Amino acid sequence: TNMLHRLYPDVPIIIGGVEASLRRFAHYDYWSDSVRQGILADAPASLLVYGMGERAICEIAHRITSGTPANEIRDVRGTCYTMSVGEYRKSDIKGTQLPAYPLVSEKPDFAAAWKTFSDADGIIIQPHPKTVIVQNPPAVPLSTEEMDRIYELPFARRQHPAIKETIPALAPIQFSIITHRGCFGACSFCSITHHQGKQIISRSEESILREAKRMAKMPEFRGTISDVGGPSANMYGAHCPKWEKHGACKNKSCIGCPSLQDGTARQLALLSEIQKIPKVKHVFISSGIRYDLIPENAEGDAYLKTISESHISGHMKVAPEHISDRVTQMMNKPGEAVFERFRRRFEKLQEGKQKRQYLVPYLMSSHPGCRIEDMVKLALYLREHNMYTEQVQDFTPSPMTLSTAMYYTGLHPFTGKRVYVPTGGEKRIQRAVLQWKDPKQYDLVVSGLLKAGRRDLIGDLVPNKGIPARPPKKR
């Protein structure tokens, strides 16, 4: 934005997207290990559009076209703007005020600011040394009709013709379909809720089928739709009657709430209709299944059977992230018991099959609250159930998430209690423990086992290469 402003000083700059959205207030920056001021205090932009900003950006474009200067547009939902410190002091603007920058760099103040932001409704204000950042209330979620219009725009589904080299990342998404927006999972480390919101906004079945039919007519199409889903595929069609009048409940989980209306039957019917389209041979789900949303009854068993037999390509991707309850509690994920019940249901479906299918768990190391002994417990669980993954996500703080607030402050913003935070060499050890079969990780795994007090696993989980089975006796 600085370069654009130098080249076109009289042209208003509007910034947005997930990177700008998550940095709209003072935030922890992992790469510099410091708290940085909100991006509008650094970038010469007139406005910041946060979240999924189609409606806001159209409103701004209409206003500017009609002659309103961009820096005078201050009432569009889903936007942030700035005002001078002097103007703010004279104004009568009312809203929730966050601790000012740089005061918010102090860890207790950062934790308090995160909680205040999370609890706030309406306008939110954060003073900075040279400016004041003001956030308007979030945009009203799109309607189903608006979602349909956006996703039925004539996207090329091809790389730009100016790029001659093959783009490997295009292949997994070229023939995929987005069915909905939003996620009420509220995982501590995930920013989707902050960007798309908790409410699920689903496209109509008719719109999705039209997109699939257009896709099937493309010359590059080979019969496989690689993904039909969203942040969690089986949230499609989920609905709560309270969303339309009151929005999503603050600081309450939708999962397990009796008001939440399940959408699994609607999802199965949609997948079945897509499967009937000429030239479509396979309809897969690659965006992940939220296993704790699958009802633990006959209906849920039928759903799981259909999905596993018809809509996964041999591997079902799920995200337990961990099985140590004290870690999953910090992650706001289901605990070991929930995942174990799901694993048993899935394994029961494999009985008698000549070609069995497998669970692929997404796992995370070094999350706040996680110790080496928790990683050892997870490794033993995986070994016991013949699960192993070479890909392990090591927790990396991203702006605006609860996990990042815990990582930086060592405090839980909602309780004020201290949280253990693995850093430095321990992060490498935690990751290595989940890769215990990799010879390159041997030394780190052994170090982790010793630190966790599990010397007994040397020669069991990993080979014993001359390490004493127990410490030598002191003389």
Image (tube, rainbow, N blue to C red):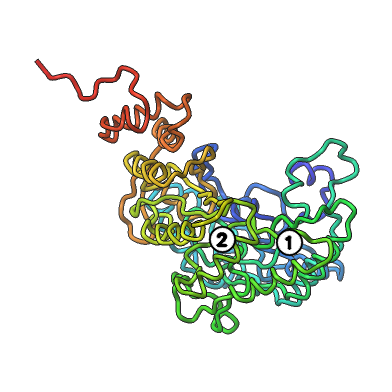
Q: Is residue 332 visible?
A: no
In the picture of the structure, the residue carrying the numbered disc 1 is 177
In the picture of the structure, the residue carrying the numbered disc 2 is 289
- Residue toward you, 422 or 32: 422
- Residue toward you, 207 or 106: 207
Look at 29% across and 29% down and name the residue there.
450
User: Which quarter of the figure has residue 247?
Assistant: bottom right
- Indicate the amino acid at tag 1: Ile
Q: Secondary structure at mark 2?
A: loop
Q: Residues within 10 Å of mark 2 (few under 14, many from 20)?
A: many
Residue 471 in the image, given as x and y percentages of width and height: 20, 23
Q: CA distance from mark 2 to mark 1?
A: 15 Å
Q: Secondary structure at mark 1?
A: strand
Q: Is residue 2 left or right of residue 387?
A: right
- Residue toward you, 464 or 243: 464
The C terminus sits in image quarter = top left
Residue 432 in the image, given as x and y percentages of width and height: 44, 33
Residue 221 in the image, given as x and y percentages of width and height: 84, 54
Q: Is residue 132 left or right of residue 273?
A: left
Residue 153 vertical position relative to residue 190 in the rendered view, above or below? below
- Indicate the amino acid at tag 2: Ile
Residue 448 vertical position relative to residue 217 in the rendered view, above or below? above
Look at 44% across and 69% down and name the residue there.
251
Q: Earlier in the sequence, mark 2 or mark 1?
A: 1
Q: Is residue 105 left or right of residue 44?
A: left
**Callout 2 touching callout 1 (CB < 8 Å):** no
